[in-house]
Image (tube, rainbow, N blue to C red):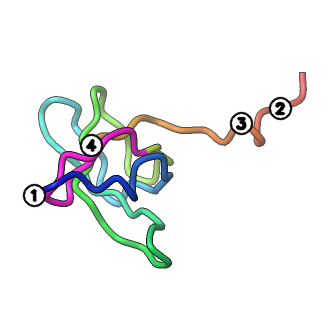
Amino acid sequence: MARDDAVIGRTGELLIGTRGPAGPGEVLVSVRGGTETFLAWSEQPLSKGATVLVVESRGARQVDVIAWGDPLDAPAG
C-alpha cells in the first residue's frame, strides 16, 4: 500500500504505548476532517497517553512517531 502523506506532520495521542523495536502501539491522529487510528512505531518505547508527532508513513495504516511536546507550552525562560 502507498504512503499516506496526509498524516505526516500531524500530532496524535497514543492509545496503546509503543515498545520500540519490540513492537508497535496505536495512535489516534486528527486527519482529513476526523480522527483515524494507525499502528505506531517508534525507536524508543513511548507510554500510553503520550503526545507524538508522525514523522513517516509506512503505508497500510502504519506510521513512525516520535515524542512531541508543544513548543508553545514551554515555560518562559
Separation of disc 3 and disc 1 at Cα?
33 Å
Q: Are marks 1 and 2 in contact (CB under 8 Å)?
A: no
Location of mark 2 (residue)? 75
Residue 4 place in picture, x, y as percent: 28, 56
Secondary structure state at the residue bearing disc 2:
loop
Residue range (magenta): 54-63
Q: Which three-letter amino acid code belongs to the residue tagged 4?
A: Thr
Task: State the residue in front, 63 or 77.
Answer: 63
Residue 9 among those drawn in magenta: no
Figure check: 23 above or below 33: above
Separation of disc 2 and disc 3 at Cα?
9 Å
Find residue 66 and report its image quarter: top left
Pointer 4 or 2: first along the chain? 4
Location of mark 3 (residue)? 71
Pointer 1 or 2: first along the chain? 1
Q: Residue at x 14, y 40 (%)?
A: 23
- Label annotation for residue 1: 1
Separation of disc 4 and disc 3 at Cα?
23 Å
Q: Residue at x 46, y 43 (%)?
A: 53
Q: Residue at x 32, y 40 (%)?
A: 56
Residue 42 place in picture, x, y as percent: 28, 35
* Crowd around label 2: few <14 · some 14–19 · many ≥20 (10 Å): few
Q: Which three-letter amino acid code belongs to the residue tagged 3?
A: Pro
Q: Are marks 4 and 1 in contact (CB under 8 Å)?
A: no
Location of mark 4 (residue)? 18
Q: On the picture, is 57 further left or further right than 10?
A: left
